[in-house]
Amino acid sequence: MNNIKNVEYIPKHTNCTNCGKCCGPVLMGEREYKTIKDYCIKNNIKPFFRLDNTCYFRDEENKKCLIYKVRPVICKLFGVAKGMKCVNGNTCEIDGYKYIPKSSKIFSMFRLAKELEDKQGE
């Protein structure tokens, strides 16, 4: 039960106010990396490079995630998984480990943002 299809069973976090406190650069597996990269290219999404720990795909001005439809599993687990506390309170406490996809390669959000920036500069 450890594959990407399981994300459909992650409960929705109903206390979310879209404050962005959980939006930091995260690690992701190879499949997530490719999915997000393709989505950004198709939708002409440009990352925001910041010096703080805010996610490069968080639009602070509009208070939204630019890659919400394809965001990494780790992002979906905030506020619903044990140990992933939301400032507004968790709506459940599931075991999030079984939802994290296994991958032989791990990618950073920075690498993805930099690759997209380089591709757009070509």
Image (cartoon, rainbow, N blue to C red):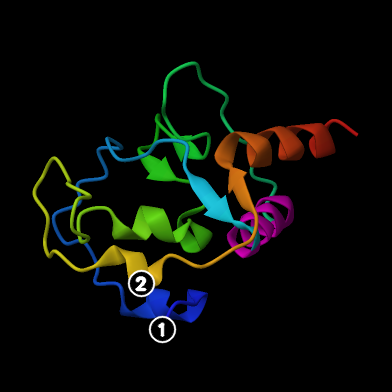
* Disc 1 target residue: 1
Asked if 74 appears above or below 19 in the picture, the reply is: below
Amino acid type at image mark 1: Met
Q: Residue at x 29, y 64 (%)?
A: 96
Neighbor class of circle 2 (other Cα within 10 Å; few <14, some 14-19, many 20+) is: some
Left or right of 75? Residue 96 is left
Q: Residue at x 27, y 53 (%)?
A: 78
Whether residue 35 appears in this view of the structure is yes
Asked if 11 appears above or below 51 in the picture, the reply is: below
Q: Residue at x 38, y 70 (%)?
A: 99
Instruction: Find numbered disc 2 in the image and state the secondary structure of the residue it sits on.
Output: helix
The kind of secondary structure the magenta stretch mainly shows is helix
Q: Quadrant of the C terminus?
A: top right
Asked whether residue 105 is drawn in magenta, I would say no
Whether residue 46 appears in this view of the structure is no
Amino acid type at image mark 2: Lys
Asked if 65 appears above or below 54 in the picture, the reply is: below
Please report contact status of discs 1 and 2: CB closer than 8 Å, yes or no: yes
Which numbered tag is attached to residue 98? 2
The residue lying furthest to the front in this view is 104
Q: Quadrant of residue 60?
A: top left
Left or right of 104? Residue 69 is left
Image location of residue 100, percent across then percent down = 43, 65
Image location of residue 113, percent across then percent down = 65, 37
Label 1 – label 2 distance at C-alpha:
7 Å
Instruction: Find numbered disc 1 in the image and state the secondary structure of the residue it sits on.
Output: loop
Q: Quadrant of the N terminus?
A: bottom left
Neighbor class of circle 1 (other Cα within 10 Å; few <14, some 14-19, many 20+) is: few
Q: Earlier in the sequence, mark 1 or mark 2?
A: 1
Front residue of this view, candidates 24 and 93: 93
